């Protein structure tokens, strides 16, 4: 199972195992990772699962598609490496992925 590391805005790291096919958001919720609210439940209809993808992982994860990019307009402190965690599907090649949650969602 791929391991995902979630870093909160204060720098606390939590590494959990994710299931291939699940999303980074679903994995965070299943493991009670703070900082990901996921108000829409993963429908890409809010921006409350916003994360920053670590630089080393940007090319592997890929860029946000148009619908996700539109939703990121509602997120706070959007950066070049911003993604919605509900749109990142876990695959074997994401083992070791590191994402950071912003200081506030939405």
Image (cartoon, grey):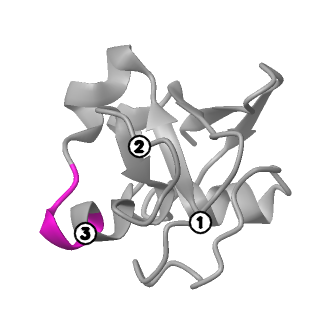
Q: Which residue sits furthest top? A: 56
Q: Secondary structure at mark 3?
A: helix
- 103 vs 81, left or right, is right
Compute the Cα span from label 2 to label 1: 12 Å
Dominant secondary structure, magenta = helix
Please name the residue shown 28% across and 66% down the image.
68
Disc 2, SS: loop
The relative height of residue 81 versus residue 55 in the rendered view (above or below) is: below
Neighbours of disc 1 within 10 Å: few (<14), some (14-19), many (20+): many
The circle on residue 6 is none
Measured Cα–Cα span from mark 2 to mark 3 = 12 Å
- Kindly indicate the quadrant of the structure image that contains residue 72: bottom left
Q: Nearer the viewer, residue 22 or 9?
A: 9
Which residue is labeled 2 in the image? Answer: 78
Element carrying mark 1 = loop
Residue 27 position within the rendered picture, expressed as x and y whole percent measured from the top left: 65, 58
Q: Quadrant of the N terminus?
A: top right
Residue 67 is covered by the magenta coloring: yes
Q: Is residue 80 left or right of residue 34?
A: left
- Which of disc 3 and disc 2 is earlier in sequence? 3
**Residue drawn at 36 percent across, 17 percent down:** 55
Q: Is 103 drawn above or below residue 105 in the view shown?
A: above
- The answer to whether residue 72 of the structure is visible from this angle is yes
Label 1, on which residue? 48
Q: Is residue 5 above or below residue 44?
A: above
Residue named by callout 3? 70
Which of the marked residues, 2 or 1, is nearer the chain's N terminus?
1
Which segment is the magenta one?
64-68
Name the spot of residue 85 as percent of width and height, x first: 48, 56
Q: Seen in the image, is 15 located left or right of residue 73?
A: right
Q: Is residue 91 visible?
A: no
């Amino acid at each position: 199972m791929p391991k995902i590391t979630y870093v909160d805005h204060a720098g606390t790291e939590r590494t959990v195992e994710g299931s291939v096919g699940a999303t980074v958001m679903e994995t965070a919720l299943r493991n009670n990772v703070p900082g990901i609210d996921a108000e829409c439940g993963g429908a890409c209809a809010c921006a409350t699962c916003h994360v920053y993808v670590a630089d080393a992982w940007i090319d592997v994860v890929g860029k946000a598609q148009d619908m996700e990019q539109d939703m990121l307009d509602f997120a706070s402190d959007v950066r070049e490496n911003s993604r919605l965690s509900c749109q990142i599907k876990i695959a074997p090649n994401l083992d070791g992925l590191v994402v950071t949650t912003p200081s506030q969602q939405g």
